[in-house]
Image (cartoon, grey):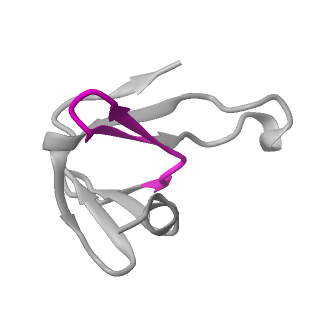
Amino acid sequence: MRIYDLKQKEVINVKDCKRLGYVGDVDFDMEKGCVLALIVPGPGCICGFLGREKEYIIPFCDICQVGNDVILVELKNKEEKK
C-alpha cells in the first residue's frame, strides 16, 4: 500500500464512531523503515480561513483495521495537538 492510498481513506474512531477526517501525513522512522503514526488534520476554524484548529496524531499501535474505504482506530484518550 502506498501513502497516496492511505490519504484516500477516512479515519474513524471505534470508541465513539466519530469521523476524524482523512489521512494528511504519515510519520516514519527512517532508520527502522516503519510507520510510527498517522496524522489527520482537524476541522478548519471559521470556515477554514484561519487554518486548522488541531490535528490528530494516531500512533500505529492504535490502528485497528485498514479497510478499502476507511481506517478504524481506537483512540484511548484525546490524541490532539495544536
Q: Residue at x 31, y 37 (%)?
A: 37
Residue situated furthest bottom in the rendering: 68
Q: Residue at x 39, y 35 (%)?
A: 27
Does the magenta segment cover residue 29?
yes
The picture places residue 69, in percent across and down from the top left corner, at: 39, 78
The span shown in magenta is: 20-39
The mark tally for this picture is 0
Q: In this view, does 4 lie to the left or right of 59?
A: right
Name the quadrant containing residue 58: top left
The picture places residue 11, in percent across and down from the top left corner, at: 38, 58
In depth, the one of 29 and 55 nearer the eye is 29
Q: Is residue 44 left or right of residue 62?
A: right
Name the quadrant containing residue 36: top left
Q: Which residue is drawn at 46% across and 69% down?
A: 5
Q: In this view, does 55 lie to the left or right of 80?
A: right
Residue situated furthest top in the rendering: 82
The picture places residue 3, in percent across and down from the top left corner, at: 46, 58
